[in-house]
Amino acid sequence: MVTLCFDFGNTRLKVAVFNNDQFVEELYLQNDSVETIHELLIKYQPQKTILSSVINHNAAIEKLLDEYSIFHKLSADTALNFTTPVGKPQTIGADRLALMAAAVHFFPRKNNLVVGLGSCITYNFINQYHQFLGGGISPGMDMRFKSMHDHTALLPLVSADWNLPLVGYDTKTNLQSGVIFGMASEIDGMIEKYANKYDNFNVVLTGGNSGYFAGQLKNKIFADYNFLFKGLYALSELNNCKA
């Protein structure tokens, strides 16, 4: 049984293909047009689809997905494998709901901190009783690079590099060192604060920029680039149960 899990974020439009419960591949979409989505549906013939979106996507594709598959849109009405005792479910981002679903599915009965590295850094904490208590949000890597360029007269816009020095030797490497090593220290510091408060503790690092930081952190983590997709699949199985 094929399931397509759509993740429309602020930076990229992505879809993951699952065959039963096995992750097969990830695809990047050029746009959210009806034509683009229709081509995917014809190619993969999914029995189930799920959409997580934090943008104003093309509403017409929801009708298309519903016509070609058993479709679910992640929302405040989504059935969850956890509870949200703090705040209102409708205020929680769709991406964070998916990450928490994956944490409960793969690491049940643990105090889980899921660190998502995308446009922003999201710290998402769910306790061992499967209660999502919230967390924190701070600027992501690309946002930090862009902010220093936009809010100064002379600093250039640079991007990350895998082989950056700790001690920058020019403007570019100074900016790279400050952002990447600064973020690594921030993430380590946040992990330590949670670890000091909670036992039976587990950390998951995920998101598009996680590759830059998995090897930089001193704390023990579980890195899974596809963790959000796996959460979407778990929620699809829970909500698309009429198949």
Image (tube, rainbow, N blue to C red):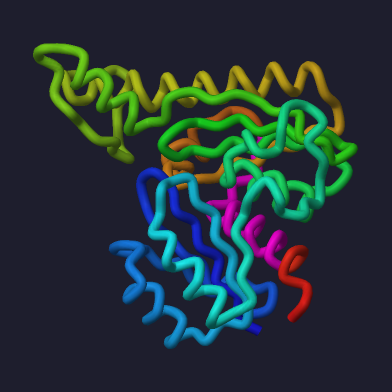
- Observer-nearest residue: 78 or 19? 78
What is the total number of numbered labels drawn onto the structure image? 0
- Observer-nearest residue: 30 or 34? 34
Query: Can you give x and y, in whole percent of width and height, for residue 147 in the image?
Result: 27, 21
- Observer-nearest residue: 133 or 227? 133
Q: Quadrant of residue 137?
A: top right
Magenta stretch?
Answer: 220-236
Is-magenta flag for residue 44? no
Is residue 111 visible to us here? no
Compared with 95, 85 (above or below) is above
Compared with 151, 205 (above or below) is below
Q: Quadrant of residue 39?
A: bottom left
Question: Which quadrant is the C terminus positioned in?
Answer: bottom right
Query: Can you give x and y, in whole percent of width and height, for residue 95 in the image?
Result: 57, 45
Residue 202 shown left or right of residue 19 in the figure: right
- Residue that appears at 82% across and 40% down: 83
- Residue that appears at 32% across and 33% down: 142
Is residue 210 visible to us here? yes
Residue 94 shown left or right of residue 104 in the figure: left
- Observer-nearest residue: 3 or 62? 62
Residue 212 shown left or right of residue 170 in the figure: right
- Residue that appears at 70% across and 60% down: 235
Query: Can you give x and y, in whole percent of width and height, for residue 84 in the image?
Result: 78, 36
Residue 234 shown left or right of residue 147 in the figure: right
- Residue that appears at 25% across and 21% down: 175
Question: Which quadrant is the N terminus positioned in?
Answer: bottom right
Query: Can you give x and y, in whole percent of width and height, for residue 72 in the image?
Result: 63, 65
